[in-house]
Amino acid sequence: PKFLHFNSPLNLPFIPRLKPINSVKLSLNPQTMQKPLSKTLETLTKLKPFLQTNHRSILLGWLCSSVSVFSLSQIIPKIGSFSSNLTNNVSVSKLRDQGLVLGFLVLVKLVARYWQQAFLWEAALRTVYQMRVFVFQKVLERELGFFEGGNGVSSGDIAYRITAEASDVADTVFALLNVSNRVLLKTIVPSSLQLFAMATQMLVISPSLSLISAMVVPCMAFVIAYLGERLRKISKRAHLSIATLAAYLNEVLPAILFVKANSGELSEHARFRKLAFEDLSQCLAKKKMKALIPVIVQIIYFGVLCILCIGSLVVSCGSFDGCSIVSFVTSLILLVEPIQGVGKAYNDLKQGEPAIERIFDLTKLKSEVIEKPDAIDLDLVKGEVKFCDVSFKYVDNMPLVLDGLNLSIRPGETVALVGPSGGGKTTLVKLLLRLYEPSTGSILVDNHNIKNIRLESLRRHVGLVSQDIILFSGTVAENIGYRDLMTYIDMERVERAAQIANADEFVRKLPEGYRSLIGPRGSLLSGGQKQRLAIARALYQNSSILVLDEATSALDSRSELLVRQAVERLMENHTVLVIAHRLETILMADRIFLLQDGKLQELARSTFLAGHHDSLMSTGVVI
Ligand code: ADP
Ligand code: MG
């Protein structure tokens, strides 16, 4: 139909076609070639502290790995002599002894291999556990803008990084720990000894051919480094695509009611398919690249061998015998094996690098809200609040949300804040809680600049009932006593708070009263019930300053009346900042302010009583 936008997800059926991004493009870019090594080192340094704490498991794992490699090196020649002894007439007792030794060695190898895996997995998983715990702590400390700003990271993306991508890091760490020791023991150490002998021999046979052979090493190292960098980039895209998918699911599943109510199943399915297909393409590209690397390395390897063989035949025809050529090729193979081993480890690391990068990106603290080391704790707060010339904007090139705002609230006073939606009322509250820092000006609580108060202390003294009600899955009591979740929830205080917030009545009707579970995000409760729990939670905290950000918007008239009476009772010993649209709530306040276009203006009570009321209604200030 004409009215459908061309790119609309409703343009079904969505027929996936492989995009050109799948073909692995190889292009030499000198700029990207300089970075890989320093970047890889940077990535490894991030993991270093976590690996260090697990050094015991790593060393034990490596020890077992050495035992396993060593016993294997003993088993192979012993099998040879054992089988030749079987055919030669050797005494049974000698055969039995040999068999026992062989059996013992095999057992040692198997046990050592098991413990090698067990220790190294323990090290890798513990490393990731510690990294996760560290990263989540940093995420919790991050500035609010990181989560809700214009370029904020979606919660689904963050969740994906801390869960699935961290598991990828475990795989990478394990692969690296596992391969490093084996490469060293199996190839580098023995072959470097042999290489020395070979190199001398090669030099004696033909110095010029030795030089050509030596070229293989840098050539392969270069190719491995280059392909590793490509793999890192492709891996990163694959991570991004699946993170987008996770973020999408995180957004749409909690909104399932809305989706169903709007018959959005079809379009959501199409959106999902599109994102899932994008992920398919990216993951396929990654797998292809992984498969391509050994192929290219092998091709180069054999190419060089061919050139060498032909070259030696053509250049020095007659001066070589067959034996010299064979020695040459053998030494070359020995030379290349360790490089391949190192190359594999390097590529494992490269593939895991994006996950490590993306996880540690979460810890890049850019917060301007930083607690000073000498910040003070406020024990008792009278509840005086002052905004002095406060200006604020969220984004640099956007207009000011608050423009030179001045407001002074006396202890115990109730101030109502009204204004059109989008006027900056919630922003003002965020500044008071120091979730954002004002661009200019200062905010004082009891004449202390809030910059000098410990964040925990400030936020304990300012109780907030936010506009968006936030409840967690758990019991009613846990939600009301959220602030004491780590210590001890005082049930008496919970009940008292619930009574004041007019929640006690419905809570008691729940199957298990205050111990009833309320479902994810409080989904088992109605909007008004949720709001009353949120109010009870703010009351439980017993702060001197209480902020109600449109806290009564979801209440029915009867509940609203009861909550208003509760607020009235609170007003006696609290400083209350109430953001409201209801006339009755507004009129309870001692003073009323209008926040419009970033400016604050005091309104006389008569404005609300007289005919001006209509004009306020028409601007959305009052309902
Ligand atoms: P109110 O609570 O008065 O309805 P807000 O304080 O929520 O208004 O918002 C004031 C203005 O700031 C709005 O124009 C809104 O678009 C903008 N805004 C709110 N939050 C953000 C944010 N995190 N990033 C950027 N702009 C924001
Ligand atoms: Mg608001």
Image (tube, rainbow, N blue to C red):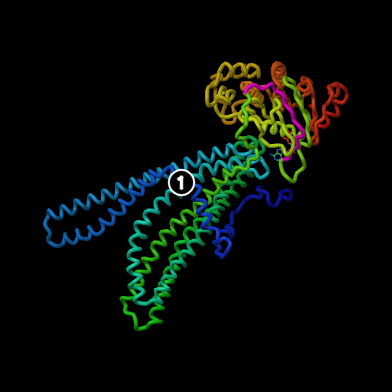
Which residue is depicted at the point 18% across and 54% down? Answer: 98
Residue 597 in the image, given as x and y percentages of width and height: 80, 36
Image quarter of residue 531: top right
Amino acid carrying label 1: it is Ala
Which residue: 33% across, 48% down? Answer: 64
Judge whether residue 617 is colored magenta. no
* Magenta residue span: 379-393
Q: Is residue 434 visible?
A: yes
Q: Is residue 209 left or right of residue 474?
A: left
Quadrant of ligand 1 in image: top right
Q: Is residue 463 left or right of residue 241?
A: right
On whether residue 390 falls in the magenta region, the answer is yes
Q: Which residue is mark 1?
A: 170
**Helix, strand or loop for disc 1:** helix
Q: Residue 421: x percent and y percent?
A: 76, 33
- Image-based side of 131 in relation to 108, left or right: right
Above-or-below relation of 29 to 308: above
Instruction: Give how far across and how far down residue 216 sits, in percent.
Output: 43, 69
